[in-house]
Image: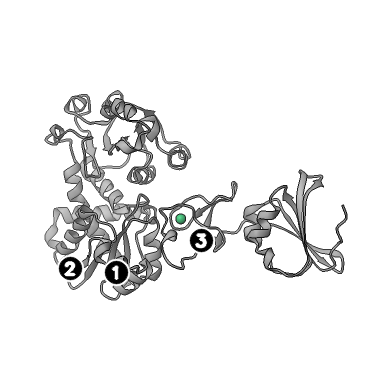
């Protein structure tokens, strides 16, 4: 059974193929209206994430399929102490494909071991979130037209932000990519991520603590939230937080064809005044997320039927 | 110091000094009812000091976990008082059901009767990571 647990489960060719299908769905939605007719997606959310769950459900409905599931553990059998393995074994009998989100890292691996239908990891704690990375990738492709020869700035919490690590891993597979890592000292990219995906591949990169120093170089700017609780003290937080807030003044220094991404939800790291800038892609990005999930559901169902 | 040589059994030699008790515990040697000698801080040509464990019984040892705890250790199989075989240790591709994942956010902390499984991710540094959450194993 083919699952998607970790973005690295997919080859570069498979990602390119998913993005091509996603783009075709955006351009010709009518072709796909019945692509998953009579098929059922179960969305099993052991912790709430309304945004991700709605994206999956919208994707399946637009493919002509049906959805069932639960949106938090307290309304499911997990609250009575049922194991992940048992829940998945049971739901495998009710659905053709499962998207699961769980607060514990590695839960989808346990789920996949008992599933008789494909499993999609819709986030396991701070560990993996492969459909977010696919969303980021289709956005870059759709907005820039390419993956190669891009200078990609990653800004904010680069230490704990797993979507940042996955995006680095995925983008490091394309030629001509450069990374600019923008974060406070306390929230720098962990050395194993830097060693494995940047240094070992000889990819040019630079590290800085202030966005305004580097924004003019960037083709892609990936913003993340800098959480107050990640800082050792309040003083540092107050001193540094503005360095990681995107404002119209900073946008004025950037290239005309920059694209700004954010996995959402945003708190205050992008000023609302930036939203009307055509370079702000984050709401379009959320929309593309639905299309790439449609492509993924179709692919996994197809492979399951082989 | 004089310790009887064993006639039939296994000698785990060249254990890094100080690791004998850890090996004793992790290989569950306390469950055996044969004679076992633990020699600590013996003189060694190779490393200065070493620990040795002598087991007077021909048991099946988990050489994989031994390799993980102490890759320099060597195994001598003794028959009729003679070394009939020397074995070098090789790191196993996976370690199952011995190490426990220490990441409190890992699914292994809550899922019932789950086997803790670690995968060899870097043979040069003997690095193992939890199959579920990718957290590094510590020995
Ligand atoms: Zn673990």
**Residue A91, position in %: x, y?**
29, 72
Image point (13%, 58%), residue name: A29
On the image, numbered disc 3 is attached to which residue?
A: B117
Image point (43%, 67%), residue name: B112
> Which circle marks residue B127 in the picture?
none
> Which circle marks residue A65 in the picture?
2
**Residue A148, position in %: x, y?**
32, 40
Q: Residues within 10 Å of mark 1 (few under 14, many from 20)?
A: some
Image point (40%, 53%), residue name: B105
On the image, numbered disc 1 is attached to which residue?
A: A77
Between A60 and B69, the one nearer to me in the picture? B69
Q: Earlier in the sequence, mark 1 or mark 2?
A: 2
Which mark is in front, 1 or 2? 1
Task: Say whether residue A87 is visible.
Answer: yes
Which mark is in front, 2 or 3? 3
Q: Quadrant of residue B33?
A: bottom right
């Amino acid at each position: 059974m083919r699952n998607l647990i970790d973005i690295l489960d997919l080859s570069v060719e498979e990602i390119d193929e998913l993005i091509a299908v996603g783009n075709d769905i955006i351009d010709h939605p009518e072709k796909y209206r019945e692509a998953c007719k009579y098929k059922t997606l179960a969305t099993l959310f052991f912790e709430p994430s309304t945004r991700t769950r709605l994206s999956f459900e919208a994707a399946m409905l637009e493919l002509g399929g049906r959805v069932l599931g639960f949106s938090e553990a307290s309304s499911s059998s997990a609250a009575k102490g049922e194991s992940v393995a048992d829940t998945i074994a049971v739901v495998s009998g009710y659905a053709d494909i499962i998207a699961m989100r769980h607060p514990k890292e590695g839960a989808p691996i346990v789920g996949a071991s008992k599933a008789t239908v494909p499993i999609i990891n819709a986030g396991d704690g701070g560990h993996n979130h492969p459909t977010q990375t696919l969303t980021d990738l289709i956005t870059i492709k759709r907005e820039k037209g390419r993956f190669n020869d891009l200078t990609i700035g990653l800004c904010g919490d680069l230490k704990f932000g797993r979507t940042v690590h996955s995006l680095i891993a995925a983008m490091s597979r394309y030629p001509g990519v450069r990374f600019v890592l923008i974060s406070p000292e306390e929230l720098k990219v962990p050395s194993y991520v830097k060693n494995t995906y940047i240094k070992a591949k000889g990819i040019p990169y630079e590290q800085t603590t202030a966005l305004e120093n580097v924004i003019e170089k960037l083709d892609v700017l990936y913003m993340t939230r800098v959480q107050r609780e990640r800082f050792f003290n309040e003083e540092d937080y107050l001193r540094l937080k503005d360095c990681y807030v995107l404002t119209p003044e900073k946008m004025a220094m950037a290239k005309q064809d920059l694209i700004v991404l954010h996995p959402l939800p945003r708190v205050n790291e992008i000023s609302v005044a930036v939203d009307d800038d055509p370079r702000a892609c984050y709401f379009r990005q959320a929309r593309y997320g639905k299309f790439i999930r449609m492509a993924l559901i179709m692919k996994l169902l197809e492979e399951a039927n082989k | 110091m004089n310790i009887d040589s064993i006639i039939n059994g296994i000698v785990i030699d060249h254990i890094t000094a100080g690791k004998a008790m850890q090996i004793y515990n992790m290989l569950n040697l306390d469950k055996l009812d044969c004679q076992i000698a633990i020699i600590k801080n013996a003189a060694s040509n190779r490393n200065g000091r070493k620990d040795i464990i002598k087991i007077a019984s021909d048991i099946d040892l988990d050489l994989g976990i031994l390799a993980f705890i102490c890759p320099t250790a060597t195994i001598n199989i003794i028959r009729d008082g003679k070394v009939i075989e020397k074995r070098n240790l090789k790191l196993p591709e996976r370690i199952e059901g011995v190490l426990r994942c220490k990441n409190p956010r890992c699914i292994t902390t809550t899922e019932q009767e789950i086997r803790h499984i670690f995968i060899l991710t870097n043979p040069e540094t003997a690095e193992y990571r939890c199959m579920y959450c990718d957290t590094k194993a510590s020995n």
